[in-house]
Image: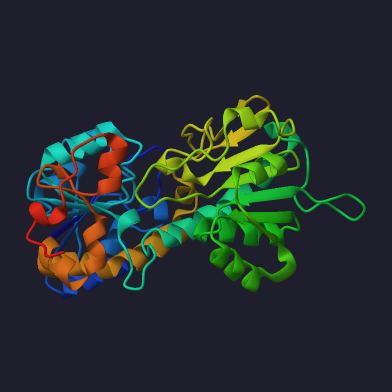
Amino acid sequence: MKVGVPTEIKDQEYRVSLTPVGARELTDRGHEVLVQAGAGEGSAITDADYEAQGAKILPDAAAVFDEAELVLGVKEPQPVEVEMLREGQTLFTYLHLAPDPELTKGLAATGATCIAYETVEGANGGLPLLAPMSEIAGKIATQAGAFMLEKPLGGRGILLGGVPGVAAANVMVIGAGAVGFNAAVVAIGMGADVFIYDISIDRLRDVETVLGEGCSTVFSSSLVIEEHLATADLVVGAVLVPGAKAPNIVTREHLKLMKPGAVLVDVAIDQGGCFETSRPTTHDDPTFEVDGVIHYCVANMPGAVPVTSTRALTNATLPYVIALADHGVADAAQRMPGLIPGINCAGGKVTYQAVAEATETEYVPVDQVLDIKL
């Protein structure tokens, strides 16, 4: 199979969807790897590194999309890339379709099979292709929040860990999944007073077992969040409903409860955001202010550390890429059933129910458009 690796073109996205390690694994199996010139430069990978492992370098994205049967990506395709997709082709990347009806309809219209990293499920549950980026985003969320609390950047002017005789900052982490756990770990390491919220007592119990007295675990409810926002200096939104639009946990009305210069970091922004006042931002213009509260809502946080995040992502995706290249979508999905919920669009239809509901499009079960037994 011909596997294509185009350069990511989303604003300030430096990751790449395949490393030379992956190129070697694919070429050893008889597949052809087509890499756009310069695709790996942002992740400190040269064209020569790919060529040394048997990949072929093509001059531009059009050439990659034209030849490839399986196209690998990192972020959701941009409009110019959607136009290059075609029926019979497979796209494997993060899609985050729930908050984007236009992209959903555009991808469906291409007739391509579009598989979303974020809804692929592991053999023992969980979201194995979302997990590594969630871990990185969680750590960046606390780092970024600590930085944005500095006065020159609009924050309260408080040091996250405090100093002897001066209290540390109060950090709320809403959601105790991979993002929230890692955000809490970094906040604890920086010396903050950390509170982590979730609606799962079992998950909170697991977090407390691992982190011990380093943080306080709190059962999440609207009332509890309202009560605690008044004391928070930094709030990390780490809420996830797999494949669906994130719920608004903090409303604009809630901002009136918060300290001037407090910081909200919305890691759920790819799924529409879990703060009502959130909107996507970029690394070169990461924040905005609403009612005196600083919002950090960068939609590709791991893209800021591509040397780390590219390798973490491709370590996780490679077994699935190999399966797709070796067997095609239908056979690979039967061999690795976790791929089935990853298929968001196929045969011109939306095949993931949460996406269809969020984007108000028709939902068609995947087995009705592909030769897959559910």
Residue closest to the eye, 22 or 322: 322
Residue closest to the eye, 312 or 138: 138
Residue 17 vs 122, above or below: the answer is above
Q: What residue is shown at x 30% (from left), y 60% (from top)?
A: 120
99 left or right of 345 in image: right
Picture quadrant where residue 373 is located: bottom left
331 left or right of 222 in image: left
Q: What residue is shown at x 61% (from left), y 54% (from top)?
A: 197
Picture quadrant where residue 300 is located: top left
> Looking at the rendering, in which quadrant would you find the N terminus?
bottom left
Q: What residue is shown at x 39% (from left), y 42% (from top)?
A: 245
Give the number of callouts: 0
Picture quadrant where residue 290 is located: top right
Could one spot residue 144 in this view of the protein?
yes
Q: Residue 204: image x %, image y %?
A: 59, 64
Residue closest to the eye, 177 or 70: 177
347 left or right of 185 in image: left
> Looking at the rendering, in which quadrant would you find the C terminus?
bottom left
Q: Residue 289: image x %, image y %?
A: 61, 27
248 left or right of 47 in image: right
Residue closest to the eye, 199 or 97: 199
